[in-house]
Image: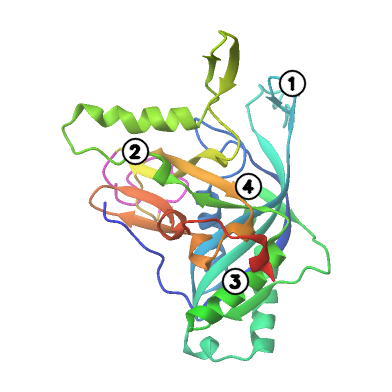
């Protein structure tokens, strides 16, 4: 699959401090916690369809910033989801418990837009009105299955044109970073995995082993010169908050015509069976980002391989040294 890059955008929409209740905390078959980027690219697609085709804009990518979360779990060492038996069966008896992970979130979303000619030359009051319209439409949708609660009145959405000059873009993004803190932005870190080996080699499992090492705590003994043994773990301080991340889906079957597969939710759309694709992500403070391209997640589709996945350009554009707090000025 060829390397993709973020398509061209000319505006940024900031939706600040969305309070989400009971979002889906089971992000994939091998991990649980915060919803993955596919939940938010799907939200972006649903929002664009809800707005209607008469609005001259395209939603290209979405940035995910978490300000607060509260997983609905209990337990000291082993965490268990808070589950309920509802609704009741027809005879009034309690139904079997189906594991359903939930999490409360406070999020900010940054959506990259490609505006049409009319909106590209619109005034800032017109863009502010459009931003309020988009946020009102967003409140009628669900975020990763969770309901959006009314937010604080002092947090207002903001839609701004993206300057063409690179220096002006960086200045605009530095101002945006202030509104995103305190919080953590989700970026891709597939660069921590070893390169894809050539086909036919026996090293195909090396990337899986590396991914598994990043997804768990490996404890091992270390002996000093005096023979004293101390236990250390694989996640040392300073390596970042690395997480396993479901980033898309891979096809398991051919694409079946619409209506040919029984019991599908949508009888008018072609369907195929897929499995989850995993990568690595990192939660980091927005002040360490230097460009909007490092923040946005965008979807892609490769028809030849049947891969549907989300991409983020942070590994390709990350600076050699992290941004310093002085750049916030």
Q: CA distance from mark 3 to mark 4?
A: 30 Å
Check contact, mark 1 vs mark 4: CB within 8 A. Answer: no
Q: Magenta residues?
A: 253-267
Can you give x and y, in whole percent of width and height, for residue 88 in the image?
A: 73, 28
- The circle on residue 52 is none
Q: Nearer the viewer, residue 51 or 268?
A: 51
Q: Which residue is the extreme one toward the front?
A: 226
Residue 173 got which mark? 3
User: Is residue 107 shown in magenta?
Assistant: no
Ranked by sequence position, the earlier of labels 3 and 4 is 4
- Outermost residue toward the right in this view: 153
Residue at the image position 46 percent from the left and 75 percent from the top: 9
SS assignment at label 1 = loop
**Which tag, 1 or 3, sits closer to the chain's start?**
1
Residue at x 69%, y 53% (from the top left corner): 183
Residue where numbered disc 2 is placed: 194
- The residue tagged 1 is 93
- For disc 3, the neighbor class at 10 Å (few under 14, some 14 to 19, many from 20) is some
How far apart are the two marked residues, 1 and 3, measured between alpha carbons?
A: 56 Å
- Res 145 label: 4
* The one of 96 and 20 positioned closer to us in this rendering: 20
The C terminus, quarter of image: bottom right
- Of the two numbered discs 2 and 1 on the same chain, state the one appearing first in sequence: 1
Q: Position of residue 81 (x, y in %)?
A: 69, 28
Marks 4/2 in contact by CB < 8 Å: the verdict is no
């Amino acid at each position: 699959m060829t390397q993709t890059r973020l398509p061209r955008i000319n505006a940024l929409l900031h939706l600040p401090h969305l309070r989400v209740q009971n979002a889906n905390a089971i992000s994939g078959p091998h991990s649980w916690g915060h919803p993955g980027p596919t939940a938010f690219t799907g939200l972006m697609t649903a929002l664009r369809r809800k707005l209607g085709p008469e609005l001259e804009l395209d939603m290209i990518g979405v940035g995910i910033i978490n300000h607060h979360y509260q997983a609905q779990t209990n337990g000291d060492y082993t965490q268990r989801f808070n589950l309920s038996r509802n609704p009741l069966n027809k005879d009034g008896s309690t139904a079997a418990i189906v594991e359903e992970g939930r999490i409360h979130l406070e999020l900010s979303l940054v959506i990259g837009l490609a505006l049409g000619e009319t909106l590209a030359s619109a005034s800032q009051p017109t863009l502010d009105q459009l931003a309020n319209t988009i946020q009102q439409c967003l409140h009628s949708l669900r975020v990763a299955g969770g309901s959006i609660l009314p937010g604080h009145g002092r947090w207002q959405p903001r839609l701004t044109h993206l300057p063409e000059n690179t220096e002006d873009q960086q200045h605009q993004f530095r101002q945006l970073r202030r509104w995103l803190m305190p919080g953590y932005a989700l970026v891709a870190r597939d660069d921590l995995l070893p390169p894809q080996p050539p086909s036919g080699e026996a090293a195909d499992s090396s990337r899986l082993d590396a991914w598994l090492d990043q997804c768990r705590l490996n404890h091992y003994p270390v002996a000093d010169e005096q023979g004293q043994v101390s236990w250390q773990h694989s996640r040392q301080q300073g390596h970042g908050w690395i997480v396993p991340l479901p980033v898309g889906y891979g096809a398991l079957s051919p694409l079946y015509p619409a209506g040919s597969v029984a019991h599908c939710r949508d009888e008018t759309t072609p369907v195929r069976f897929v499995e989850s694709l995993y990568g690595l992500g990192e939660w980091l403070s927005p002040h360490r980002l230097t460009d909007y391209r490092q923040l946005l997640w965008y979807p892609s589709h490769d028809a030849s391989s049947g891969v549907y996945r989300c991409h983020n350009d942070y590994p390709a554009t990350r600076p050699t040294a992290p941004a310093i707090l002085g750049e916030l000025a």
